[in-house]
């Protein structure tokens, strides 16, 4: 009878144990264990811990994957270097507060957490963050003994750190799998290089493969993907205790996302899960292009992805080996045209939109301003460049670079200002050339105006004023009332933007967002709430152009649709503000290239011909093919914008004039010379000649 009772007791305990594991457990205690075929599931069912065999391998590993995603996606592996050769794996927590993975057939320890902390009541738990933690069940404050987030594999999850904990001695670094069948650490790794100005670096073996550029308070200087968005927020911490980068989901976000190192392509990839298509969608991959490959252009060179060739020596530098450079071997980089003369005094030239150089040989000071930073660099003959450490709030802090400047690239829509040391005479050369260009442009413009006025001048000032008043169908106040009331009249079939929306998009018209300034007023870069990038032309109150030009541009360009005309997205006329909102052109205007000796090299003949053809197509449309017959009357290089593929788009229709169908020339009185309004004749033929 006693034997029967004992047998029933053993069977009952076994059934209870099996029933316990048939439910979704998220933890085990020292009195329990988990065998191959059983799993732990996090409380909300997000992640699952269990044994798996990758690809065609028959070896067994303990890992974590997404519970409800049909494509099994492993995010962490415990025994990467020591697989189990059969299905005899067993996981438990021993009496020394260690997590132990055993091969039950051989009774050998395959992997252990080697926890140095002890607890009276340890418990192993899988959290909904994907973090496997060993904690003290009786310590409600923290009681953390060990966590898998301190031992990353090839995947970074929200809440996981990449970097260093100098107190605990952690080097949080990702490492790729060797292959899809072998999760052991591959030679592609990513972490933070802990120099004075830390940055994220990816290595292939011991060689640098990619780097992000130093953190500038907003993002990494060489990255464009780290931007404010409704899904994630990013944090970078650098102090005497910790140096790390982390990203977290915003509380309202339900996006499933991960960063992973691809062992095949040697890329760091960001994926999000698409529930509708049941697939992982690639959002960002770095390196993004050839210019992200570390040191592609060698020292003192700038990598420009849209250029041919992509590698260009920095201004005032030349190829170290012209012969190799012309063979597209840029590894030797560039050297100075004129050696520095520290004793007699050097200066600096500012470069915009760059990924800052490799920070290995750099020095930083968080308390200096830019003026003090310049003086610090100028006082050290080995200092080759300087910049702000933090670009927020007008800039703060100081970074100095020493020796050759490595791994610089032009960052489309991003980057940072860098001041590079030059021989004093070369600073003067640059300023003299700039002044000569300004003088040449001014002379040409004055000559054009005077020549046109001499030939065409024939009517008195009074008649001109009368003609202009007749051409305006409504007064400025009427137009303001239309826009303020939101009415879409026959001339105003265009979205109206609130001033507050434009102020938010441009960071309250920050000087950091300013693209340039013309006769109309300043132009700012902005980003709307839906992520659309825009260019905002804001009428200056002291501008020589006024409300009539603003109205004229809204009326005309709103009725024009052509691939070589800039697209007007809307306007704003609130209070005393008048603004036009255009599509953003990332490559700025044509004069930015043709009047700059260095950037002019980017325009080879094929690109120049494409730009010429595009302008001609746009003019043909204006003069002949559009339902209106329009003369631009202000066609110049600064009014030809270039999109991301260097395609030209004609802009600025403030002085444009509409003609009747059979008219080829007309009169205007909108040109002013020394404050006097003068009438002159402008024709289609004269506009074509301006090209």
Image (cartoon, helix red, strand yellow):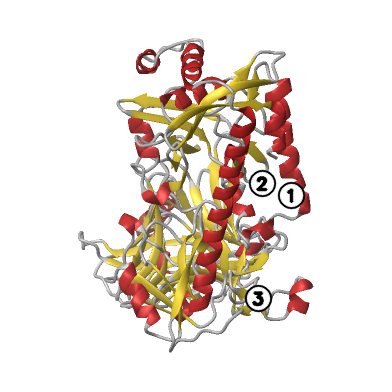
Residue occupying image coordinates x 78% and y 78%: 323
Q: Which residue is mark 1?
A: 607
The quadrant holding residue 686 is top right
For the residue labelled by badge 1, is the local secondary structure a helix, a strand or a loop?
A: helix
What separation in Å lies between label 3 and label 1 (alpha carbons)? Answer: 24 Å
Position of 578 with respect to 450 (left or right) is: left
Q: Position of residue 141 (x, y in %)?
A: 20, 61
Q: Is residue 354 above or below residue 636?
A: below
**Relative to the observer, which residue lies in front, 138 or 89?**
138
In the rendered structure, which disc, 3 or 2, sits on the residue that comes first in sequence? Answer: 3
Examine the image and state in which quarter residue 308 appears: bottom right
* Residue bearing mark 2: 646
User: Would residue 309 be found to the left or right of residue 528 on screen?
Assistant: right
Instruction: State the residue at coordinates (51%, 21%).
Output: 460
Residue drawn at x 45%, y 23% as measured from the top left: 548
Camera-nearest residue between 243 and 664: 664
Quadrant the C terminus occupies: top right
Q: Earlier in the sequence, mark 2 or mark 1?
A: 1
């Amino acid at each position: 009878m006693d034997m029967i009772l004992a047998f029933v007791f053993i069977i009952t305990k076994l059934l209870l144990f099996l029933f316990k594991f048939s439910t979704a457990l998220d933890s085990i205690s020292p009195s329990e264990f988990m065998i191959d075929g059983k799993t732990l599931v996090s409380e909300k069912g997000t992640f699952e811990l269990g044994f798996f065999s990758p690809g065609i391998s028959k070896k067994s590993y303990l890992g974590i994957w997404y519970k409800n995603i049909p494509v099994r996606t492993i995010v962490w592996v415990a025994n990467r270097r020591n697989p189990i050769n059969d299905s005899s794996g067993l996981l438990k927590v021993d009496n020394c507060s260690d997590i132990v993975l055993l091969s039950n057939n051989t009774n050998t320890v395959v992997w252990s957490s080697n926890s140095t902390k002890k607890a009276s009541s340890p418990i192993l738990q899988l959290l909904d963050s994907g973090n496997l933690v060993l904690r003290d069940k009786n310590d409600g404050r923290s009681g953390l003994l060990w966590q898998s987030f301190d031992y990353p594999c090839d995947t970074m999850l929200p809440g996981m750190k990449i970097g260093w904990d100098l107190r605990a001695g952690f080097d949080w670094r990702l490492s790729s799998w060797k292959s899809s069948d072998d999760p052991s650490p591959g030679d592609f790794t990513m972490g933070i290089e802990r120099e004075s100005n830390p940055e994220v670096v990816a290595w292939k073996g011991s060689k640098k493969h990619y780097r992000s550029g130093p953190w500038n308070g907003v993002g990494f200087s060489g990255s464009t993907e780290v931007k404010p968005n409704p899904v994630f927020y990013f944090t970078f911490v650098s102090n005497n205790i910790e140096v790390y980068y982390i990203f977290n989901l915003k509380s309202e976000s339900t996006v499933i996302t991960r960063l992973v190192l691809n062992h095949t392509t040697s890329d760091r990839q960001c994926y999000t899960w698409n529930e509708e298509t049941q697939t992982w969608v690639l959002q960002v991959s770095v390196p993004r292009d050839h210019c992200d490959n570390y040191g592609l252009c060698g020292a003192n060179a700038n990598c420009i992805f849209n250029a041919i060739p992509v590698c260009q020596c920095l201004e005032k530098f030349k190829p170290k080996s012209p012969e190799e450079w012309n063979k597209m071997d840029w590894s030797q980089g560039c050297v100075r045209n004129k050696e520095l003369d520290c004793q007699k005094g050097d200066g600096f030239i500012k470069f915009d939109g760059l990924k800052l150089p490799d920070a290995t040989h750099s020095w930083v000071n968080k308390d200096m301003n830019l003026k003090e930073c310049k003086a610090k660099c100028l006082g050290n003959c080995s200092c080759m460049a300087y910049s702000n450490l933090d670009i927020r709030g007008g800039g703060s802090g100081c970074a100095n670079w020493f020796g050759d400047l490595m791994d610089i690239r032009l960052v489309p829509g991003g980057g940072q200002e860098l001041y590079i040391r030059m021989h004093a005479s070369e600073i003067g050369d640059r300023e003299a050339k700039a002044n000569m260009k300004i003088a040449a442009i001014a002379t040409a413009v004055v000559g054009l105006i005077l020549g046109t006025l001499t030939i065409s001048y024939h009517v008195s000032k009074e008649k001109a004023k009368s003609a202009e008043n007749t051409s305006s169908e409504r007064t400025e106040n009427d137009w303001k009332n239309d826009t303020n009331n939101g009415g879409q009249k026959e001339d105003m079939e265009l979205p109206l933007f609130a001033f507050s929306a434009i102020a938010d998009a441009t960071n309250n018209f920050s000087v950091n967002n300013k693209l340039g300034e013309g006769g109309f007023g300043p132009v700012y870069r902005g980003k709307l709430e839906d992520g659309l990038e825009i260019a905002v032309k804001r009428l200056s109150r002291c501008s020589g152009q006024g409300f009539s030009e603003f109205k004229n541009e809204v009326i005309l360009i709103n009725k024009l649709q052509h691939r070589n005309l800039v697209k007007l997205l809307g306007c704003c006329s609130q209070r005393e503000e008048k603004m036009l909102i255009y599509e953003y052109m990332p490559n700025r205007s044509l004069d930015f290239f043709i009047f700059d000796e260095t950037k002019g090299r980017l325009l080879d003949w094929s690109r120049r011909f494409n730009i010429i053809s595009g302008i001609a197509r746009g003019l043909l449309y204006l003069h002949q093919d559009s339902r209106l017959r329009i003369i631009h009357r202000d066609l110049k290089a600064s009014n030809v914008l270039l999109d991301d593929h260097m395609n030209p788009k004609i802009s600025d229709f403030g002085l444009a004039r509409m003609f009747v169908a059979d008219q080829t020339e007309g009169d205007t009185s909108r040109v002013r010379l020394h404050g006097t309004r003068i009438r002159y004749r402008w024709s289609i033929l004269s506009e074509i000649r301006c090209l």
